[in-house]
Image (cartoon, helix red, strand yellow):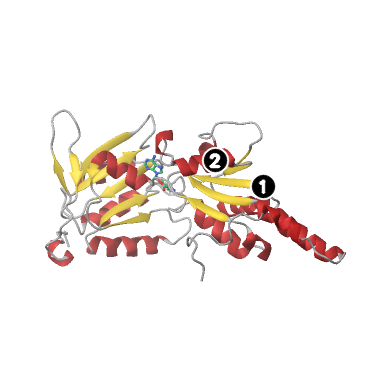
């Protein structure tokens, strides 16, 4: 019904004057309700994407939201990327408590604070924005009046693609290899379907502390559908001082799976993804925009 952006779940925080609409009757309960509403109307929650690392990759809109925040909430290392400022409180938390962190953010916003939840990359990609909406869905009805805004950021796969050339020039998809929130059989079923469809496949969370074997298993599966010389990108800490970009073949990637870590984005090429060699630097990786063969015809697997 609303003409507003689809992520806006309530009217913008325009009605600072809503206190003027105070109850006429001197009814305690009514007044309490109105006061609560007025307070809530001045609070807000913005979920901000900090990009992959370098401040140049933070959008001006995300920066403006950070500058306006009274409270910053997020995983410690992400919060460390936002400079300290007087009058702004940082609430650091562990990486594993996303929904509790989101509920805390909503509670503070309901109390009238200008809360910003920070995420690395884009907040909507395997990150905090979904946790906020999960907490909102499960939380009290009063939270529905909190203006919630999602400020996008550059997600890891786009940063990695930009460094490599244009590997996402054709159809592609993204999967998280983490089996914290979904069974591993779901991961393999989706991966198999994506391989059969000949997408370029971006793998987030290739390795986790709980399970270091996922990437090896995923690449073994890829080798059943793609040629051994298919380009595979290991893009580590893109946009940070310790960035490393490695262009490998699928066979080399299988051998190197143990070298990927939690800061690595892995990209498996489609059958048409190719390299342009150059002197003294890694080759460019690109996927042509046009496709002439059906996925079945291009499948070059071993089985
Ligand atoms: N919201 C983030 C993704 C969170 S999932 C985003 O949009 O980028 C965490 C995974 O993202 C990591 O395991 C890694 O696969 C990837 N990632 C995040 N930052 C990265 C970076 N700077 N370089 C490479 N991969 C990164």
Q: Nearer the viewer, residue 158 or 7?
A: 7
Neighbor class of circle 2 (other Cα within 10 Å; few <14, some 14-19, many 20+) is many
Q: Are marks 2 and 1 in contact (CB under 8 Å)?
A: no
Q: Residue at x 65, y 51 (%)?
A: 109
Please provide percent x and percent y for residue 225: 20, 59
Please provide percent x and percent y for residue 86: 65, 31
Q: Residue at x 67, y 47 (%)?
A: 113
Q: Disc 1 designates what residue?
A: 113
Residue 93 visible (yes or no): no
Q: Disc 2 designates what residue?
A: 66
- Quarter of the displayed picture in which ligand 1 can be seen: top left
Residue 154 horizontal side relative to residue 62, left or right: left
Q: Determine whether 301 is above or below 50 in the image.
A: below
Mark 1 Cβ inside 8 Å of ligand 1: no
Residue 30 horizontal side relative to residue 15, left or right: right
Quarter-of-image position of residue 68? top right
**Of the residues under marks 2 and 1, which one precedes in the sequence?**
2
Quarter-of-image position of residue 145? bottom right
Residue 61 visible (yes or no): yes
Neighbor class of circle 1 (other Cα within 10 Å; few <14, some 14-19, many 20+) is many
* Secondary element at tag 2: helix
Q: Residue at x 26, y 43 (%)?
A: 233
Measure the alpha-carbon separation of dots 2 and 1. 13 Å
* Secondary element at tag 1: loop
Please provide percent x and percent y for residue 139: 64, 62
């Amino acid at each position: 019904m609303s003409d507003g952006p689809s992520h806006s779940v309530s009217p913008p925080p325009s009605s600072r004057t809503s206190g003027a609409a105070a109850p006429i009757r001197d009814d305690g309960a009514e007044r309490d309700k109105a006061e609560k509403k007025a307070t809530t109307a001045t609070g807000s929650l913005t979920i901000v994407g900090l990009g992959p690392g370098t401040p140049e990759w933070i959008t001006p809109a995300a920066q403006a939201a950070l500058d306006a925040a009274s409270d910053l909430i997020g995983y410690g290392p992400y919060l460390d990327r936002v400079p300290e400022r007087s009058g702004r409180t940082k609430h650091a938390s562990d990486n594993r408590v996303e929904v509790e962190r989101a509920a805390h953010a909503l509670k503070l916003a309901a109390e009238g604070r200008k809360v910003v939840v920070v995420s690395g990359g884009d907040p909507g990609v395997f990150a905090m924005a979904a946790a906020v909406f999960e907490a909102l869905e499960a939380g009290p009805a009063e939270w529905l009046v909190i203006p919630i805004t999602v400020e996008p950021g550059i997600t890891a796969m786009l940063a990695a693609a930009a460094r490599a050339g244009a590997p996402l020039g054709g159809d592609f998809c993204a999967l998280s290899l983490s089996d914290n929130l979904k069974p591993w059989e779901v991961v393999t079923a989706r991966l198999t379907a994506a391989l059969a469809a000949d997408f370029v496949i971006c793998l987030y969370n290739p390795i986790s502390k709980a399970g270091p074997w996922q990437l090896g298993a995923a690449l073994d599966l890829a080798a059943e559908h793609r040629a051994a010389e298919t380009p595979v990108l290991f893009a580590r800490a893109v946009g940070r001082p310790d960035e490393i970009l490695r262009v490998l073949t699928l066979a080399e990637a299988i051998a190197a799976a143990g070298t990927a870590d939690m800061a690595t984005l892995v990209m498996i090429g489609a059958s048409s993804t190719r390299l342009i060699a150059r002197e003294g630097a890694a080759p460019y990786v690109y996927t042509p925009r046009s496709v002439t063969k059906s996925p079945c015809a291009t499948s070059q697997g071993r089985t």
